[in-house]
């Protein structure tokens, strides 16, 4: 019997560092995410969660460290003994593999919902327009936006906008989806729907990293919880274990704070 | 002293020639100047410090020197480089350079006024910076560009009068000729006033049509207000 080799993680982050004007925001972040895994990234405000997502998309180039997407180096590659920073084109080529849903969504207001989803496929993936339109219609219908394709973002509700933004990211056939606080900009009554949608994506096998304050989501949908504090991931483990038996005192304090801050549900 | 309209009746072909040359010079200077302006605005947003310093020097220099000096620098400077153009070409070039610095600032300001997330979301799906500009940024800033660009274009049209000082036979030059021949300066300059006014009215009118045609600004405004509102509500924590 040959032992099965350990599968390469879909996302592998090692020794990632980022400073802004000399202030370190990320200090040696390590994170491996297996294919199909859902990781909830939690932590106090200012701990570097959003910066980590921005570094993972190379919107803010990390100062140091490596990111591998499906085994392929993203942004910085180790060639022999030397570290080589990739050019813009190389970075752009991998970007569609990483779907990002921003907290503020950043839909393009001058384009209809359909065109928001179609345009990047045509421009970046060079898909024929008919194919891109068909794909966009499929996705929008699947996300409950059937019939709203021709609406402009201003005429969509908050929840609809968010689903349009998710469709835009999914249309690029990403291997990994990143969500930056997907529930924080929504009315409270819409939070449940978004969590359900994320649960569905997880069920379909999408690999996801979700920055969230929704402890319920972290506990019930995520496979793993990573807790960040002071620019490091200080605890990382199966969701249940992290929630019920936090090892790090900072995590325990954080969970207490969050649980006491919300009405008993 | 009496106002003598007969002078205008005799000399209208000169005014017409001058006006036509002014219009052509300004049209070319607008196209060339705006193209340079867009390139300079894009260069000003490139991460490279060297490029930004060059752009800053270009814009700063052109904006700090009176147009007539820019014109003389180009007119007397080009021959040093062994380049000899007819005066109207030199003049058009100088006018385009002069206007390009202001157009660049207009375009750069409009780009920066768009929330940065618009550009970033285009970059994250894999668009190149230029594709993001082309598909996401420029369609949204187009309408806002019109009013300040019209202002600058009107200024440029009026500055084109300075080309008369390097013997370009444009409108102002012709009025000086008429004045010299007839010793009737008021009649000549009154006619020129009317013609400049007519040119600028046409330009302003065209711009208004363009502004009305450039699509979705109202929608954008609604979107922006909604976005601003959502930021505001985020700032103020919901507690009740």
Image (cartoon, grey):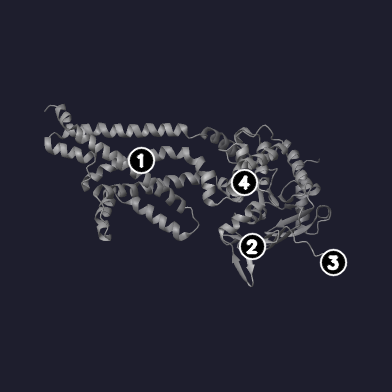
Q: Residue at x 46, y 46 (%)?
A: B109
> Which secondary structure, mark 1?
helix
Q: Disc 3 is attached to a residue of which chain?
A: A
> Which secondary structure, mark 3?
loop
Q: Residue A58, can we see it? A: no
> Which secondary structure, mark 2?
strand
Q: CA distance from mark 4 to mark 1?
A: 41 Å
* Up/down of A208 relative to A67, above or below: above
Q: Which residue is mark 2?
A: A17
Q: Which residue is mark 3?
A: A3
Q: Disc 4 is attached to a residue of which chain?
A: A
Q: Which residue is mark 4?
A: A127
Q: Nearer the viewer, mark 4 or mark 1?
A: 4
Q: Disc 2 vs disc 1: Cβ atoms closer than 8 Å?
A: no
Q: Which mark is residue B153?
A: 1
Q: Position of residue A147 (x, y in %)?
A: 67, 31
Q: Position of residue A41 (x, y in %)?
A: 72, 53
* Up/down of B200 relative to B122, above or below: above
Q: Nearer the viewer, mark 1 or mark 3?
A: 3
First along the sequence among labels 2 and 3:
3
- Apparent side of residue B35 relative to residue B169 in the rendered image (left or right): right
Q: CA distance from mark 2 to mark 3?
A: 35 Å
Q: Which mark is residue A25?
A: none
Q: Nearer the viewer, mark 3 or mark 4?
A: 4
- Apparent side of residue B134 relative to residue A127 in the rendered image (left or right): left
Q: CA distance from mark 1 to mark 3?
A: 74 Å
Q: CA distance from mark 3 to mark 4?
A: 41 Å
In the image, A141 versus A104, the foreground residue is: A141
Q: Position of residue B124 (x, y in %)?
A: 61, 50
In the image, B207 versus B19, the foreground residue is: B19
């Amino acid at each position: 019997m040959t032992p099965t080799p350990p599968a390469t993680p879909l996302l592998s982050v090692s020794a990632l560092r980022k400073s802004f004007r000399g202030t370190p925001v990320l200090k040696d972040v390590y994170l491996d995410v297996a294919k199909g895994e859902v990781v909830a990234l939690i932590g106090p405000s200012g701990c570097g969660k959003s910066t980590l997502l921005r570094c993972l998309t190379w919107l803010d180039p990390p100062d140091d460290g490596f990111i591998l997407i499906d085994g392929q180096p993203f942004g910085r590659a180790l060639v022999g003994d030397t570290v080589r920073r990739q050019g813009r084109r190389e970075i752009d080529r991998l970007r569609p593999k990483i779907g990002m849903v921003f907290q503020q969504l950043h839909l393009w207001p001058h384009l209809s919902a359909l065109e928001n989803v179609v345009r990047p496929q045509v421009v970046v993936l060079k898909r024929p327009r008919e194919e891109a339109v068909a794909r966009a219609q499929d996705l929008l219908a699947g996300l409950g936006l059937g019939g709203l394709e021709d609406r402009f973002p201003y005429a969509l509700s908050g929840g609809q906008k968010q689903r349009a933004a998710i469709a835009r990211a999914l249309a690029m056939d990403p291997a990994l989806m990143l969500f930056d606080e997907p529930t924080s900009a929504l009315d409270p009554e819409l939070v449940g729907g978004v969590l359900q949608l994320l649960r569905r994506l997880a069920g379909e096998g999408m690999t996801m990293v979700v920055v969230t304050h929704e402890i319920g989501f972290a506990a019930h949908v995520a496979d793993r919880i990573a807790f960040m504090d002071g620019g490091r991931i200080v605890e990382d483990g199966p969701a249940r274990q992290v929630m019920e038996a936090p090892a790090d005192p900072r995590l325990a304090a954080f969970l207490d704070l969050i649980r006491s801050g919300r009405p008993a549900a | 002293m009496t106002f003598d309209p007969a002078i205008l009746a005799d000399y209208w072909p000169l005014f017409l020639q001058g006006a036509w040359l002014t219009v052509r010079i300004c049209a070319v200077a607008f196209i060339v100047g705006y193209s340079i302006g867009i390139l300079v605005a894009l260069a000003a947003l490139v991460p490279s410090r060297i490029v930004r310093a060059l752009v800053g020097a270009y814009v700063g220099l052109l904006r700090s020197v009176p147009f007539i000096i820019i014109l003389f620098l180009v007119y007397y400077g080009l021959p040093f480089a062994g380049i000899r153009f007819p005066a109207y070409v030199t003049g058009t070039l100088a006018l385009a350079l002069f206007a390009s610095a202001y157009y660049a600032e207009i375009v750069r300001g409009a780009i920066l006024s768009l929330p940065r997330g618009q550009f970033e979301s285009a970059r994250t799906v894999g668009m190149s910076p230029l594709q993001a500009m082309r598909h996401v940024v420029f369609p949204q800033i187009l309408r806002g560009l019109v009013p300040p660009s019209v202002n600058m274009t009107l200024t440029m049209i009026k500055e084109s009068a300075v080309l008369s000082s390097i013997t370009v036979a444009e409108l102002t030059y012709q009025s000086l000729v008429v004045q010299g021949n007839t010793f009737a300066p008021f009649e000549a300059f009154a006619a020129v006033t009317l013609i400049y006014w007519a040119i600028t009215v046409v330009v302003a009118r065209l711009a208004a049509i363009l502004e009305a045609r450039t699509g979705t600004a109202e929608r954008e405004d609604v979107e922006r207000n909604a976005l601003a509102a959502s930021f505001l509500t985020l700032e103020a924590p919901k507690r009740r």
